[in-house]
Image (spheres, rainbow, N blue to C red):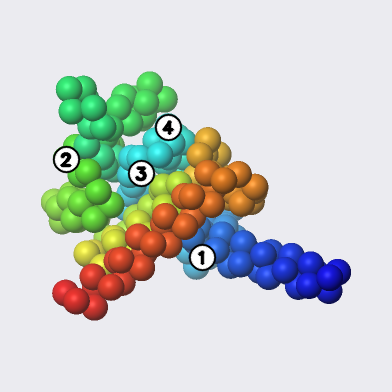
Amino acid sequence: MIRGLIIGLAGFATITFILGYYLQPDDLAGCPESPNLSSNCQRVDAVEAISGGDTDARVNQAINLYKQGWADKLIFSGAAEDKTGPSNAAAMKKIALNRGVSESDIYLDETSATTKQNAENSGKIFEEHSIKSIILVTSGYHQRRAFLEFSKVLKNIKILNHPTANDKDWSSTYWWIAPHGWWLALSEIIKIGIFHVMGIWS
């Protein structure tokens, strides 16, 4: 019985670690606060935050990266959750302006309602402004799928992942403690599976 319990706990711990590690890639994990010449630690053309979940955490992390010198431009992508109000992108822009970001440094995609649309509409911004590299910011549970969608659509863009550090919906370390964390993680795995299946069919 004890042996079975130990094996079960070890299996649970392994699954939890692999799932958390897979869902939330972070290309800036080994970098200092500001960019340097090391691999994956160099400046990019823009930092992009996509809305959804804890949008405030996403936009504030993107702004922090901008202020730390990682990029000269910010891109905010997301339609209005409430169709009678301003877009999420516009709401994120307001936060950035209140934090001292120049309006000329902000580009908006106000029409995207899905992660796939985030990628497609961002591509138009990249082309218009000759953007070749970005840091992509979203919540940890969403980072892998966002990267997959962006990589599929934007094959010539260098994309670095950097999920939010402080997210009210997701803890990078302790997500597995709460049922909501498991719901988010398993939902993303299902959506990633659908993404791959649709890719085979397309």
Q: Which residue is under mark 1?
A: 22
**Mark 3–mark 2 CB contact (< 8 Å):** no
User: At which x and y percent is residue 7?
Assistant: 76, 73
**Mark 1–mark 3 CB contact (< 8 Å):** no
Name the residue located 36 percent from the left edge and 68 percent from the top edge.
193
Local secondary structure at mark 2: loop
Please, what is the three-letter code of the amino acid marked with disc 4?
Answer: Asp
Local secondary structure at mark 3: strand
Q: Quadrant of the N terminus?
A: bottom right
Using the numbered discs, state the Cα–Cα distance from disc 1 to disc 3 in whole angstroms: 20 Å
Q: Quadrant of the C terminus?
A: bottom left
Using the numbered discs, state the Cα–Cα distance from disc 4 to disc 3 in whole angstroms: 10 Å
Q: Which residue is under mark 2?
A: 111
Q: Nearer the viewer, mark 1 or mark 3?
A: 1
Please, what is the three-letter code of the amino acid marked with disc 2?
Answer: Thr
Report whether 48 appears left or right of 36. Answer: left
**Mark 4–mark 2 CB contact (< 8 Å):** no
Using the numbered discs, state the Cα–Cα distance from disc 4 to disc 1 in whole angstroms: 24 Å
Please report whichever mark, 1 or 3, sits nearer to the chain's N-terminal start.
1
Q: Which mark is residue 49?
A: 3
Using the numbered discs, state the Cα–Cα distance from disc 3 to disc 2 in whole angstroms: 14 Å
Local secondary structure at mark 4: helix
Q: Nearer the viewer, mark 3 or mark 2?
A: 2
Please report whichever mark, 3 or 2, sits nearer to the chain's N-terminal start.
3
